[in-house]
Structure formats: C-alpha cells, structure tokens
Image (cartoon, grey):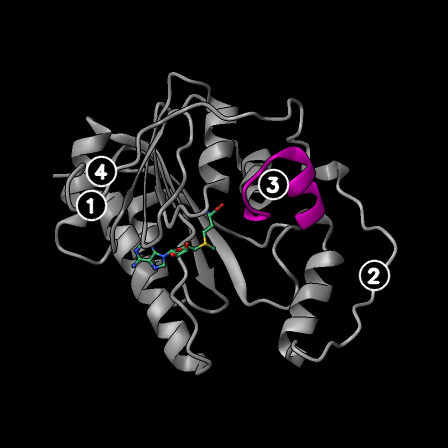
C-alpha cells in the first residue's frame, strides 16, 4: 500500500556538515540589494532580495539543511525538548525535508521518521516519506503501516498552497491542522507531543478547546526563524492524555 501508488522513497545516505544545529549562532550580514531586470517581475525581485538577505537561508545552505524551516524545529525543540527520547516521529508536510533531517540528527538512527507530502522528497537517511495528499482517505493507513507502532511526536508543517485570498488560505490551512490533530489523536502514545503550524488566531475556539482537553500542556510559539511578516505560529501540545 504505502510503497505503491503512494510512491515511497527509500532511505539512503547524504553528506552532512557536523555541529551545524545551533540556531542561536545565526547572524544577519550586510544587506544585499537586487536590481530589477527586464525578465524579472517586481515580485520575484522582492523574493530574490529577501532570500539573499535572509541569514537562515544562508545558514541552511552552509550547514546542509534542505530548508530554512529546519531552524524553526530546532528552536522549538530547544525550548520544549519534545524530540528527546522520541522513537517514532511523524512529519506531515515534509518536503523538502528540513524537519526530517533535524529529527534524524537530534534523535539518532534508532528513531523512525515517517513523513508525507504532496511533493516528492529526495531520500533522507532513516526517514520514509510518501508522496501523497494527507487529506486522501488512504493517507492515514499508509502512515500507520509505516510507523509500526504508536508515535511519540506528530509534527505538521503543512500549509495549503496560497490563493491570494486571505480568508480562503486561512480556512484551507486550518483544515489541514484539524486533520493533523485528529490523526495525532489516533497515533500518539500517551505522553506524546503534537506540534503544528497554525495561522495567527487560528487555534482560538474549537481546536484550542480540543487541544486543551487532549493534552496536559498547550503552548504557542513563533520561533525566531519564522518571518516576522508572516501570520504563521506553531502550537506545541505536550502530554497526550490518550
Ligand atoms: C512549509 S513546507 C514544509 C517544510 C518542511 N517542514 C521542511 O522543513 O522542509 C509545507 C509543505 O506542506 C505540504 N502540504 C500542503 N498540503 C498538503 C497535503 N494536503 N498533504 C501533504 N502535504 C501537504 C506542501 O506540499 C509543502 O511541501
């Protein structure tokens, strides 16, 4: 099932820069300005300038992480320590693989990382990541089969593709968070942790009530690596009551 239509990717090795994971050491350099060019739109000029001036993008490149998002997980784990001792971890919205790299690095080779994404993820040692829409009915069964037992941590960095319509984008991303939460309740071992990207204001109301009922501690964090202009935040729910 998981290896068929879902397109499972087999683990393999990859060169990694040791001692790279201290996010506190990331500093901003002198600002680079990008000139407009004939074939470049204003939006892509702004994007390029932001990438070139982003110390997390530079650090990820230097330290061998596939995404700047890797630092968000490092910063959250530094504060809450939920990866300590985790043996089975689920990574929802795993592409291009920065979080799976961090889990492998922090937890070591004995930890099983099982992930899913709409996009193909190049192999990561110790991780099995399927290419499938998490909202498809077969997705949960595929992940459960790969996990082979209850999870200690369920991570969700899923974000719906943006449409430009704020309310639509918000609702779509919150639908992913809700689905991730229900999945977490199915697979987490008692005491487990659920970490999910939410949009500001998005976990008020029903989801927050549900989280507080299901977990001993529910916190919000905007890690320093999360861009200040973005409305994203993370919810860290620890101590699953089972
Ligand atoms: C911000 S990226 C994740 C970055 C990742 N944590 C990392 O460190 O590399 C969000 C991902 O969520 C994925 N995604 C969005 N909706 C999804 C869905 N319904 N099923 C699976 N993945 C989804 C996107 O394809 C995208 O790759």
Q: Which residues are magenta?
A: 57-69
Residue 23 placed where, x, y %?
68, 38
Residues at badges 2 and 4 in contact (C-beta under 8 Å)? Answer: no
Q: Quadrant of the N terminus?
A: top left
Residue 30, placed above or below residue 204? above
Residue occupied by mark 4: 187
Q: Which mark is nearer the camera, 1 or 4?
A: 1
Q: Is residue 177 left or right of residue 236?
A: left
Kindly report the distance in space between the C-alpha atoms of the residues bearing marks 1 and 3.
31 Å
Residues at badges 1 and 3 in contact (C-beta under 8 Å)? Answer: no
Whether ligand 1 has any atom under 8 Å from the Cβ at mark 3 is answered as no
Q: Is residue 98 left or right of residue 150?
A: right
Label 1: few (<14), some (14–19) or many (≥20) C-alpha neighbours in 10 Å: some
Kindly report the distance in space between the C-alpha atoms of the residues bearing marks 4 and 3.
25 Å
Q: Quadrant of the C terminus?
A: top left
Q: Nearer the viewer, residue 143 or 75?
A: 143
Which labelled disc corresponds to residue 75?
A: 3
């Amino acid at each position: 099932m998981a290896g068929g239509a879902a397109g499972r990717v087999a683990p393999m090795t990859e060169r990694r820069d040791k001692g790279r994971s201290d996010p506190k050491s990331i500093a901003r350099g002198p600002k680079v300005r990008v000139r407009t060019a004939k074939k470049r739109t204003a939006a892509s000029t702004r994007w390029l300038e932001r990438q070139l001036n982003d110390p997390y993008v530079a650090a990820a490149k230097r330290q061998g992480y596939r995404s700047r998002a890797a630092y968000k997980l490092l910063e959250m784990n530094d504060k809450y320590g939920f990866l300590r001792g985790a043996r089975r971890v689920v990574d929802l919205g795993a592409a291009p693989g920065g979080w799976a790299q961090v889990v492998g690095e922090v937890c070591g080779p004995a930890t099983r990382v099982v992930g899913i994404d709409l996009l193909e993820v190049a192999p990561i040692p110790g991780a099995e990541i399927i290419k499938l829409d998490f909202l498809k009915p077969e997705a949960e069964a595929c992940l459960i089969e790969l996990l082979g037992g209850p999870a200690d941590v369920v991570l969700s960095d899923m974000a719906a593709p943006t449409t430009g319509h704020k309310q639509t984008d918000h609702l779509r991303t919150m639908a992913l968070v809700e689905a991730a939460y229900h999945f977490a309740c199915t697979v987490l071992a008692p005491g487990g942790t659920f970490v999910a990207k939410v949009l500001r204001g998005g976990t008020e109301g029903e989801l927050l009530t549900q989280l507080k009922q299901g977990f001993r501690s529910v916190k919000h964090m905007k890690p320093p690596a999360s861009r200040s202009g973005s409305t994203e935040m993370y919810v860290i729910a620890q101590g699953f009551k089972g």
